[in-house]
Amino acid sequence: MQSQTLLAVLSAAILFQSTNALNACPGTDTVFTGTQGIRYRVCPGTDLTGPTVSVTPKVASVAACAKLCDKSMDCFKAVYDTRTKDCHFKEIAGLNWVANDRYQVVQAEQVNIARCPAGEWTYGRNKKRYTVCPGTDIRGPTEKVFRGVADFEKCAYLCANWATCKAAVYDKAESVCHIKADARSNTLIWSTDKRYDVMRLIEPSAPAQNGEWSDLIHLPVIPVAAYVVPEYPVSQRLLVFSSWGVDAFGGPGGRTQFADYNYQTGAVSARTVSNTQHDMFCPAMSSLQDGRLVIQGGSDANAVTTYNPASNSFVRSANMKMARGYQSSCTTSDNRIFTIGGAYSGPRMGKDGEVYDPVTNTWTALPNSKIAPMLTRDHEGIWREDNHAWLFGWKNKSVFQAGPSKAMNWYGTTGKGSQVAAGIRDPIDDAMCGIFVMYDATAGKIFSAGGSSDYTDSDANARAHITTIGEPNTPAKVERVADMTYPRGFSNAVVLPDGCILVTGGQRRSKVFTDDDGALYPEIFNPATKTWRVLAPEAVPRNYHSVSILLADGRVFSGGGGLCYVAQGVGRSSANCNKLVDHADGQIFSPPYLFNQDGTPAKRPTITSLSAQSVKVGGTLTVKVDVGTTNASLVLVRIGSVTHSVNTDQRRVPLNNVRANGNSYTATLPNDSGILIPGAYFLFVISKQGVPSIAQTVQIVL
């Protein structure tokens, strides 16, 4: 339970800065795990220059030096001298990490956790049960501090007798007991730190009501953007990427760091994509009919890269007419891509629309698709005002813009384009970096919530709306619905197969590159009842540069947050950044519909066959399911792509025209490609109990 002073020291010390300073091990590092589960990174051929606390001579090996450090409550960094066999315990501050073949560096990791890494036991008192995890800390506000507490048992006694105590941290170095503040209204982060021991109240998990989170999944990059790779019959890979650095960005990089995560097997691999000379950080993304993902602009602001899932390859496509970053795009009803905005990169000016034709590989400017009517008002000016439009491809090649501005608009994508006002979504304020999703395309229903009036340093709101659209260029209907429990900026929204919307992450006050005021508790909105329910908390704040995305098995991946801005440019050290807010990890959420009331896994329907993997808009599809699945419903959810709270690819299309014959269901698809945008979809069968199958992938074509 570090004080603010110690946190500041750690932040500065972990990321020391020097002209030749390292921010990563130049060779292959190894991991030493201590007796309490604390991990130490051992990097050969490097040294920590700067103050030494103590020196132990005649230490046989670097492993022995690491063991000595692990035994010491105050050792976080050590250096082993391979010539003299000395083990140097280093100060926390004032160090430079540099290359030197004579030495090996040992550094304790402060790792965020969702499970106790080792040595967990239980404590009981006053009819309460607590889990105790040694060598861990809970960062965040404290309700009460008791000093002069002799040992952990006395701290545990104080917590058990404190009416509101659900978690306590014992500081072994200072003999201090911290009763932690309420987790539902404060941001509390559990992490490894051998100086402390943590106790937490055991409460019923109730996954049928609250859902359930996996352990943390560690990735080789910070997942600032994500895309589920369409595969047949079942999609099981998640592609994520950051910028030119796995944990850093700044300036045109000419390359992008990717990770490929198989959420069924757990396999993770890393990949640098440089053949397209495109740093894809801060782009717009939209997928085509054949599943190819078109990634536009960002740090290399003119560039366009197309990812082909069939070959798992990246190719350079035609440049946009205008350099853009932080723009949004969407796929149109005729399988083109409309994009608008993007003053963050390239010229600092509002940027009108243009459209991409994949058949000719050309972009066409749309000078009459004006950006001005959809600008927000931001104290930092235009480079923040045309960002992250809430776009929906719709009927007759039209595009509907639902936010983040107060004003809504229709955009035309043919000829020179067009713009028609569609009304006011929210008369109170703009909602930059709010969330939005089309949860029922057959009825033209759009959900939106949260965001803030300015991009950063701005209070978030909790307001939520349902917007209904009909024919293009006609006014939209807006209904204010119940507020979220938590105001959220930089959150993410995912539409689930049953039509409910899962909202994860976000901050009460939008502030880039921070974990401050993070909402760890997700909540779910039911459009049928127009009510909210708070769910089980995540382990890590998911704010600026976080993602969430629906998986084929009906679960949701939530990850990322952070990324370091390096002003000096590509490839330079990220040593001046606070790594505590960089989250190269994620968790997978199992929604309540996957559980029986007693917490056991619910029985899923099983799709045994499809009549076709590719179906035309308005065509028919026959689905066979396992015997015993009766009165089921069918739904299509378009496979999503997400970055910066924007996922214009996802939309839910319930199939209402279905004929059942035993365990066979034949669906007639909507015959409007503005409702059923071409592309790759998850096909879910949902049992009468509301449990979704594992989805099979279906391609919708014109």
Image (spheres, rainbow, N blue to C red):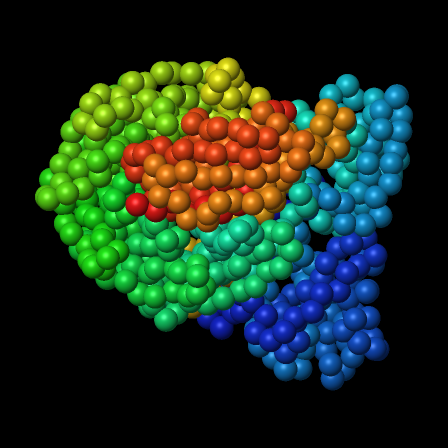
Q: Position of residue 309 (x, y in %)?
A: 44, 59
Percent x, y of residue 146: 77, 30
Q: Quadrant of the C terminus?
A: top left
Residue in the picture at 34% in, 66% down: 315
Percent across and percent down for residue 593 are 62, 29
Q: Answer whether residue 204 is visible to the viewer in this image.
A: yes
Residue at figure coordinates x 49%, y 45% from the top left: 611
Q: Quadrant of residue 212?
A: top right
In this picture, residue 252 sits left or right of residue 249: left
Q: Residue at x 55, y 50 (%)?
A: 234
In this rendered view, identify the residue nearer to me: 507 or 522.
Answer: 522
Instruction: Single out the residue that lies furthest toward the front.
Output: 661
Q: How many marks?
A: 0
Residue at the image position 76 percent from the left and 26 percent from the top: 598
> Residue reaching furthest bottom?
83
- Quarter of the figure with residue 186: top right
Which sits in the foreground, 630 or 396? 630
Closest to the observer: 127 or 61? 127
Q: Is residue 171 left or right of residue 345?
A: right
Q: Is residue 113 left or right of residue 157?
A: left
- Using the image, determine if residue 275 lies above or below residue 601: below
Q: Is residue 302 visible?
A: no
Q: Locate the N terminus by quadrant.
A: top right
Q: How far across and down, in percent of the image, does residue 392 sit?
A: 31, 36
Q: Vertical placement of 297 versus 443: above or below? A: below
Which one is in front, 455 or 331?
331
Q: Is residue 532 left or right of residue 394?
A: right
